[in-house]
Amino acid sequence: MKLQSYLLHNYKNIPQINLLSPEQLEAIEVVGNVLPFKTNNYVVNELINWNNIENDPMFKLTFPQRGMLSEFNYNLMLKTLKSTSDKSEIKRVANLIRMELNPHPAGQMEHNVPEFNGEKIEGMQHKYRETVLFFPSQGQTCHAYCTFCFRWTQFVGMDELKFASKEATLLRDYVSANKEVTDILFTGGDPMIMKAKVFATYIEPLLDSDIPNLQTIRIGTKALGYFPYKFISDDDTDEMLHLFERIIKKGINLSLMAHFSHPVELETAAVQTAIKRLLDIGVQIRTQSPVLKHINDKANVWAEMWRKQVNLGCIPYYMFIPRDTGAQDYFAISLERAWKIYQKAFQRVSGVCRTVRGPSMSCTPGKVQILGVTEIQGEKVFALQMLQGRNPDWAVKPFFAEYNPQAIWLDDLKPAFGEHKFFFEDELDEMLLQEEYLQAG
């Protein structure tokens, strides 16, 4: 297929595509052959301002941009697309580039996969004591893809990099046997891409088993932002909401971990109706997003977003730092700037919005929160703490790093005050070695 015809061919039902320049079409095809691209009519028609796409946050949140690849890798992919139509060669080059982009950050493939009855459980992660992440195989796509997505490897056809599980019974047995587990987080992809009947095959074994330690079921989803009609007028909306009601009536807290990255996503009649329907049956909605250059890297945007969320009945939950994977360089801002955005936004809202925590990095040792930049004994430092840790004892224990104005991730930081290691490093190394030893058999 001729270069730049890809988008017009695959999205011919979206007339706005004709508004894109040849340069934009080229960038979408080149980057879209490396990083995943998917959109839908709701995003295109109700969220994107096509009169100002150069500056539109929702366009940049869903359509690949040239800066998401390094100049070298962009030109390599462009040259490949121009020189061959051989799909296997295009995929080979794309995979070479992908492997440079840290496809599974924080050791997800190696370090978080649990064992049960001597077997490694594919499609599950158990990093924090109380919470199990479960990747239902039918939920490993989304209504539309975020360009910052740290799970982009789920969508690019590299099966060896995917998480997925069909084993609903194994999930039930694992949670029953591990009494410290109180929460299951269904994630993906997006579990809300599934039909209610399919999602029920995972939920019903949990409900029927009366697992006393199971207190919360969470669903990580972008459906409210990208396809709220899932909860309004889809062909199985009532069936899905009834399943949610069954969970709640069983005495289990049901929390939708809703991803909203910009206030625009909260402004349509559809999303407001969907939120109301969910709240009316007792679902909690907690909101989260990374802080992203080009999208929401201004304090007033976050303050407005938190206020809108609270006014709609949602609970602001997390501000994240974009993970060290994929197009991180395009979206990343310095840790200091992220903290200043959080601080200024926090100062502009009332206490009901201040449930939000951040800025937080989900990295190998745990969820590391930036408390701020301060000066101690004449030394300028970052003050940090873990909100979650591989060892629960690490949580809410303050520690300090040398001030580095260019730092965008934990790996860019060094311990302050002449220390050679952060307090958790020796124990973390032992944990990771132990996990590698067990997996090696």
Image (cartoon, rainbow, N blue to C red):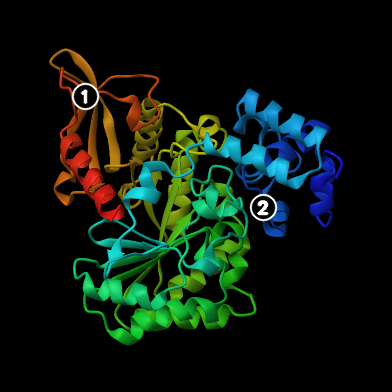
Q: Residues within 10 Å of mark 2 (few under 14, many from 20)?
A: some
Disc 2 or 1, which lies upstream in sequence?
2
**Image location (x, y in percent) of residue 395:** 19, 46
Quarter residue 13 falls in? bottom right
Q: What residue is at 74 percent from the left and 40 percent from the top?
A: 29
Q: What residue is at 70 percent from the left and 33 percent from the top?
A: 77
Q: Secondary structure at mark 2?
A: loop
Using the image, tell me which numbered label, if any, was put on residue 214: none
Q: Is 287 left, or right, of 143 in this rendering? A: left
Of all residues, the one furthest to the front in this rendering is 441
Callout 1 amino acid:
Pro
Q: What residue is at 59 percent from the left and 36 percent from the top?
A: 96
**Image location (x, y in percent) of residue 433:** 23, 44
On screen, residue 67 above or below 138: above
Q: Which residue is mark 2?
A: 38
Q: Quadrant of the C terminus?
A: bottom left
Q: Is 374 left, or right, of 72 in this rendering? A: left
Callout 2 amino acid:
Lys
Using the image, tell me which numbered label, if any, was put on residue 415: 1
Count every numbered label the image shows and give the total.
Answer: 2
Between residue 368 and residue 15, name the one nearer to us.
368
Judge whether residue 281 can be spotted in this image: no
Q: Is 304 left, or right, of 124 in this rendering? A: right
